[in-house]
Image (cartoon, rainbow, N blue to C red):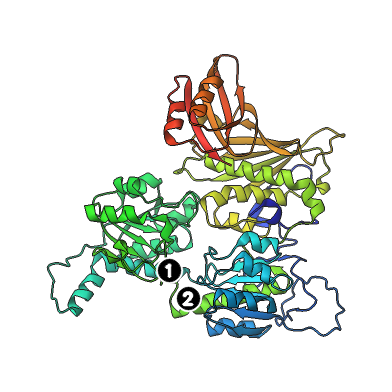
Amino acid sequence: MSSSRALLSSPHGVASRTFTRAAPAHLAAPSIPFARSGTLRARTAILSSPAATVPVTSTEPKRRISRSVSDSAPRAKPAVLVAEKLGEAGLDVLRQFADVECAYGMSPAELLAKVAQFDALIVRSGTKVTREVLEAGRGRLRVVGRAGVGIDNVDLQAATEAGCLVVNAPTANTVAAAEHGIALLACMARNVSQADAALKAGKWQRAKYVGVSLVGKTLAIMGFGKVGSEVARRAKGLGMHVIAHDPYAPADKARAIGAELVSFEEAIAKADFISLHMPLTPATSKVFNDESFGKMKTGVRIVNVARGGVIDEDALVRALDSGKVAQAALDVLTVEPPAKDSKLVLHENVTVTPHLGASTVEAQEGVAIEIAEAVGGALRGELAATAVNAPMVPAEVMSELAPYVSLAEKLGRLAVQLVAGESGIKGVKVVYTSARDPDDLDTRLLRAMVTKGIVEPVSSTFVNLVNADYTAKQRGLRIAEERVSHDNAAAEAPLESIQVRLSHVQSRFAGAISDGGDIVVVGRVKYGVPHLTVVGPYEVDVSLEGNLILCRQVDQPGMIGKVGNILGEKNVNVSFMSVGRTSRGKQAIMAIGVDEEPDKKTLEKIGAIPAVEEFVFLEL
């Protein structure tokens, strides 16, 4: 999702020239109030439609948007198409404000033919909302509701381009998913599925299906969000010792539950049982592979109720065959439904269920109500905290702020990759240097993009101006802002520089630590392109495009040539190089822009150069 399409413009200016404030607490209060239901809402004009206005049935005051028709004109109900089974409670909510048609089991061609007749489309995981579907609905379709958490089946880029808001229902099935995780944990430990199948086949095999106890065992929860923390609570009640890995989990939240936050490596090395609750992102895809399994205890047991793609399924079969992994209990698979001859599904030591994590009567009803309310709010021109994209900002705003929006996101993305995984992020400070009057620049847009850059690389959450503060608060990120005046009356640019500072963290790259002990990166826009200008105490000048290699080295002649030759030998194209140093002949940082990601051996060769003290590869 491009920066220019992920944001809403704001008419409000900054309160004062110099300030420090905590983002989640109060910044957006004037225009993003909390409604009675607890949903974060904001005004937006792009979702309005004179032909299909949703009447407000609640007595609670609502923010309204201007219409192009008079208030006395007749107002037709919007039309909502429900493409997959939705609970009656949710349908009842929808029928209060819309004409609802339920058309389950449509083919892709049938959906394409039908979608243009509706203002909103509600799906679960089985219906693909492709670019073709969204283009077919252009002119009328304004909202897509995903009844559940994952939005893998919705083309977000195409939806944003079409001005179509996408909302999901991420909270209602939390308890159901946690309970299913615990059910699989206990079922696996006591061989319930295998013993049941054997007995139904006429075999009485008590000795074969001796299980293991849960009490006193160590459970590693990988991903300590809503579902992971609920699993932890229940596991503690079973007498288990709970450790967890999640770079964004607040330490006080973990302590309150009785869990200990540890690094990824420590979690998988210590665990008797591992329960997966992480999103599927490029960083987590197949993160449980041959290498990961090799670091685990022999006889470890694994539960997955998150996403199938986080496990390399072929590697898991090998680990099961060797005994490294004693058992696995899986509710999700990479391909669903799986092939009938799947070695993993048919393995004797694997318990599988067909994606039943949210399949309880209560959860289905809760999801139905949650998505119905989110769709209703969106049709009224409101944006909920569950929005996963947002309408485009006005062209005149983006024409000026676009490079700074991109700079803010890339600085956040750069900073989070410098954090050592086990330390997490305790505090973020964003410093803006500008010659402009405070009222001429609204930094909420930029703060949202810093949040986006920090959160999205390690999360499935899609961050925009609407949900940035909410997302930061949910993840325990306290983002403070400071404005520094730049005395240049002739300056036409809205900003001189943006600094992102992460405090109380460990770094993968010691050269990024400033004299004050924080990870610091600073950037500015030059010739319309975001540039990195400071890393820790070092001044550099590199374009934030492609990928970046940072090397801390002894300042001596020939270093650029040595590194360039290594990359050239592997056909890795170098787009730029820049060296910053503290003083002559001492330490320096070399920043190298590369178009491709070098392989592991190439990076190791760079690290093996005697003068190179450390290096890190960063994706921008």
Residue at the image position 39 percent from the left and 63 percent from the top: 333
Identity, as a three-letter code, of the amino acid under mark 1: Ala
| Rendered image: mark on residue 241 | none
175, 165: nearer the viewer? 165
Residue 554 in view in this figure: no
Q: Is residue 245 above or below residue 31?
A: above
295, 222: nearer the viewer? 295
Total label count?
Answer: 2
241, 543: nearer the viewer? 543
* CA distance separating discs 2 and 1: 9 Å
Q: Position of residue 311 (x, y in %)?
A: 38, 55
* Image quadrant occupied by the N terminus: bottom right
Q: Which residue is mark 2?
A: 363
Dot 2 or dot 1, earlier in sequence = 1
Q: Is residue 188 above or below residue 326?
A: below
| Rendered image: mark on residue 177 | 1
Task: Tell me which corner region of the image, top left, top right, bottom left or bottom right, holds residue 326.
Answer: bottom left
Q: Position of residue 504 (x, y in %)?
A: 53, 40
Determine crowd level at label 2: few under 14, some 14-19, many 20+ residues with C-alpha closer than 10 A: many
Q: Decide: marks 2, 1 in contact (CB < 8 A)? A: yes
* Image quadrant occupied by the C terminus: top right
